[in-house]
Image: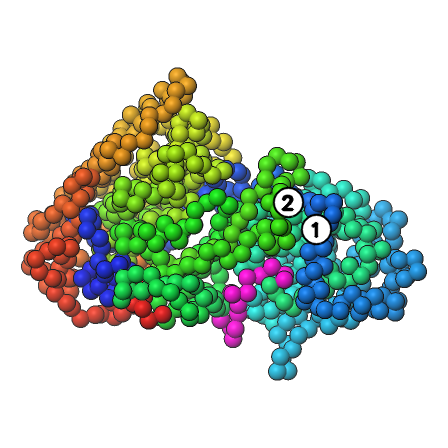
Amino acid sequence: MTRMSATESENSPYPGGEPPVGGVGRPSCPPATPPRNQPAVLAEATPHRASSHDSERAYRIVDQVRSAVIVELEHAWVQERENLPFQAYLKGIVEKECPGLDGRAETWLRTYDGYDSERNCWKDIPVATKKEDVLYDPLVQIMGDILKHFGNEELEKDGHVIKQRRVRKTHRLLMPHNPDDASKDPLKSEPDISLFGTGPSATEETTISVRPSYSQMASLWEVKVPPTFGEKERGQVGAYAREVFIQQPNRRFVYVTFMTATEIRILRFDRAGCYYSRRIDYHKEAVFFVKLVVLLSSFNEELLGFDTSIYWEHGHRFMRMKPAEVFDHETKAWKANTEELLFTVDDKPVFSRRTIRSRGTVCWSAKHKGKTYIVKDYWRAQGRAKESLFLRELAGVKGVGQMFTYQDDRESVRAGRGFVDAADMVSDDGEKPVLDRWSTRVVLPKYGDTLDKAGSARQLLCAIRDILEGHIESVLDKQILHRDISLGNLLLSPFDFEEAVLIDWDLAKRMRELIAGQATEGDSRTGTRAFQSVKVLYGSPDLLKHHDHMDDLESIYYVLYTILHGYDLHGNALQFSGNLALWHDPTQNAKSLSNNKRAFLRDFIPEPLTRFNGAEVQILKTLVRDLAEFFKPRLDNVVASLAARESFPAYSYDAAKGDYETFAGIITAAIQKLLEVPTESVVPLVPSPTASLKRRRQDDAESSRAGSIRPLRARTGLNSTRVHGTDSDSDEEQFSPPGSPSPAPQRRKSKVDMDLEEYVPGRGNY
């Protein structure tokens, strides 16, 4: 990994090799080694509906997961039409994959001891039973016989087993859930029948474990006696499917078969909800049942719902992709690509969203030719702009995460369900259409920790200042608004010319569309609930109009407040109390949160500041108070519009410039004051990767007296020069902003420099 010099353009992730003109000149902000990551209790992005991933470790019992899934999937259940298109689609898949299977299935049924061809029934299934448990064994026997006869038990290559399929009764065999859901004791559940499988996209193992696990689940089969398919049953099977998504992070969809003694329903859970068949008599439709078992035990992992571009090989996980273009550093532009890129991927994702119906974001740490990236896979909702379009335009903007490559519209939910008519995507209750979603992949260099891991108060504020600069350019110059500011989207940067970046632009929108009222479903409350502004939480677009820059600035403020009052000196998350407990409580509705934040900003009674200590505390307290005061005129406008039932004032770019100037001035003033007081030393428990990559600088107070600050963005009051002492004998390069009369001297790369190189998005040698 290379320790970047701002003047070593071949190492920069920015077009042109250096931060753009208009960058923030800064009092120097030494990144003292921050502490180790600790899990924080944070609300995740929930644009317009409840989610089963609304909080960490929230569930005491599995029934609570089921209840959350019911709410999450509200208005997202779609039954196939009377002409049975789902069944026809499944039959077509099997016929394409296994030509001639119909005839072979008919022949087998005529000779199979367990089927009566004259009466069209499976002999050992007691159709009149009122006891569910008597159905398990005969069903498992039939399905196992199908697997064995049609060669779906094992697949060998070069004399070695590479894939297996087994069907097992898992009733009373409790399978553990992921640990992040449980508030205390581990959660476990027991589908009635499970069809397990191994394969390179599914598992590292080639053989099925003796201990049943959702991580090896190919398809689920739930047995009931009455044919009722109501809320209780839906929550139960939905919770199973959700756990498969969580433990198999490259899963695109999950099949669940809902069975009685005489009928089945096939359910397809995906990121838009659940699409399911009408009831099928699997005694009379025995050939179809055979084909269904063959399909749901297929060795073709793509048919089971896996993203086969991610796979295991020789004990390592890989990802392959062939993007249409990549960023070429040599030409400082995007160029067409014809090469398949191969990434080595960590065993487990850096992050995965624990939901069914959502963007389903999964982030992987991946290496390609010695450089480390974050690959973000998610499902973009219909009507949302492509994140790649924004990131292409924001190339070179300091304070914004830079993109290496991307793949848009890899596949859609609608196509995966076999739909050709948009009218097919209408929920059972007819409430509203179910939005389509598109699989998307974005690749960025790997940045550092979230801002709660800043090693000093100065580094924290410098990080916010750099993110603010990126936000200013995105809004005022590019006219792009982020709209999802949260702690998880603000990351420390390993690059010398910036302390932090703003990532995750998948909910961004163009200002002209917002001003014109061109809304997407859920736009009025887009964002992460804990950090949403008062205006956004009120959710009254007819009066309060669209998201704007002040909503994002207010979100930045709530991130800062959370860090300063919700973390200890080592950057460990504390048990939230007071305002923070309310903001991060997923059970709170938008109205209660908006009322709380309104009172908080209006009255501002600060809570104990816990993240830093010493002389810095009073400066930070003043900063927090001054920023709260900054938002009061905005708050008055919101209250006045709601009270008088009058439209919110029209958006003004000139007013936005003034807002940015004031906000930036408050941050810059606090940074200057911090330079005048000693930094309290905080000994980290474990050094953070980000901190270890940042080189130590000289004492800032001494440096600031010897240096100078050159303002480069007069319209905001932000400054962009790093300050260094002229008598330094360290290996710190002397940074010269664009336009300086003489270039910075070159220096020999150290081991730390070499190590940092993997963070750079590439120089054309892809």
1 or 2: tag closer to the N-terminus: 1
Is residue 293 toward the left or the right of residue 699 in the image? Answer: right
Q: Do tag 1 and tag 2 residues touch (Cβ < 8 Å)?
A: yes
The percent coordinates of residue 252 (x first, y second) are: 57, 56
Residue at left offset 33%, top offset 49%: 502
Q: CA distance from mark 1 to mark 2?
A: 10 Å
Question: SS for tag 2?
Answer: helix
Give the magenta-colored segment's residue range. 303-316
- Disc on res. 424: 2
The percent coordinates of residue 410 (x first, y second) are: 50, 58
Tell whether position 650 is magenta: no
For this orientation, the residue located farthest to the bottom is 158
Q: Is residue 408 above or below residue 487?
A: below
- Closer-to-camera residue (622/379): 379
Three-letter code, disc 2:
Asp
The percent coordinates of residue 163 (x first, y second) are: 63, 71
- Closer-to-camera residue (243/177): 243
Judging by the rendered image, the residue that carries numbered circle 1 is 85
Q: Is residue 636 above or below residue 72?
A: above
